Image (tube, helix red, strand yellow):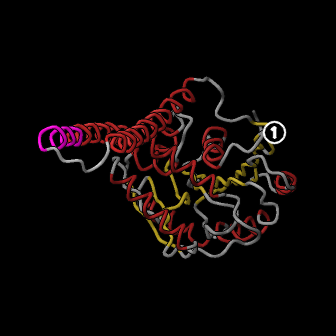
Amino acid sequence: MEKKKHQIALIIPAHNEEDNLRPFYVETHKIIQDLNNYTWEFIFIDDGSNDSTWRVINDMASLNAKVKGIRLSRNFGKEMALTAGILESAKDATAVIFMDADLQHPPSAIPKLIQQWELGFQIVTAQRKSIRYSIWREMGSSLFYFMLNRFSKLNIQHKATDFRLLDRQVLKVLQTFPERNRFFRGIVDWMGFEKTSITFDSPDRADGRSTFSFRDLFHLAVNSFTSFSLVPLRITGYLGLAVTTITSLLFSYMIITHLVLGWTLFTKLAYFVVFNTLLFGIVLAALGMIALYIGNIHTEVSGRPLYIVQDRVGFTEK
């Protein structure tokens, strides 16, 4: 009796990737067709593209029943596109692999992910050997992950990517997560399970420019930090206490030097303006940080759906 093959789903978020989808499919198909112990399906998530991405997905699905597509009603962002792939599809998959559509996650690394999974690891992440970003983005990325790991219980390597394999057990747990402000890498790291990593050389984009802007990166950094760490609130409290203590000491010094010793180093108005301005800035910073957490709470309890599916292709049932 022939042994039943495991099914692996490739989940590929795409935003304005009309020129990259077909080359991605062709190159990936060449790799996976040699992995005879598995069956495969491609699940493309069109994250509100403005170009012909959805038409290309439809064309590919019409030629291959293993190609499926989900079209979101607008651009919800990569984290929500990944979430849509997790919740809306891969119901029969033994494992899922998340990849970008621009070929910067090379399909040639898929066998390495599979190999580690076969050894018993439930989460296999792929890390770039080198990063071809600007020096400023590289420095910002290193600083972000250092701060996030330092002030949370995470341990994310700054060269880690969303290119990874998740076992079905991990996927089932991930499907139960309710939060809306999501940082996919942080959530997967936080979950635990048996994990390992591989490395890969990251090629240039097959076509076009990255659709992940600096604004997107900034919002992702803020959301991930406020989702996984309470340290900013603690720092704000400690800073407020420190400023209050220092200000009290300085005003005591002013009173002693002026009233007891008769010294006139600075005018009272100068001290008043400088230190009240400093206190005002600290209060504003504290309110801003607290507002971020309150904003996250508001988003979580608002009751809106995580995303809206406008159309599907290749699925036999809704």
- The residue at 49%/50% (across/down) is 167
Residue 82 % position (x, y): 62, 47
Q: Residue furthest left?
A: 260
Q: Amino acid at mark 1?
A: Asp
Quadrant occupied by the C terminus: top right
Answer with the quarter of the image where residue 299 lies.
top right
* Magenta residue check for 39: no
Which image quadrant is residue 317 in? top right
Residue drawn at (60%, 23%), measured in percent from left and top? 302
Residue 150 versus residue 103 in the image, above or below: above
Q: Which residue is mark 1?
A: 311
Q: Which region of the structure is painted magenta?
A: 250-261
Please state the total of marks drawn on the protein image. 1
Relative to 211, 55 lies left or right: right
Q: Position of residue 59 (x, y in %)?
A: 87, 55
| Residue plotted at (50% across, 76% down) | 130
Q: Is 253 included in the stretch rendered in magenta?
A: yes
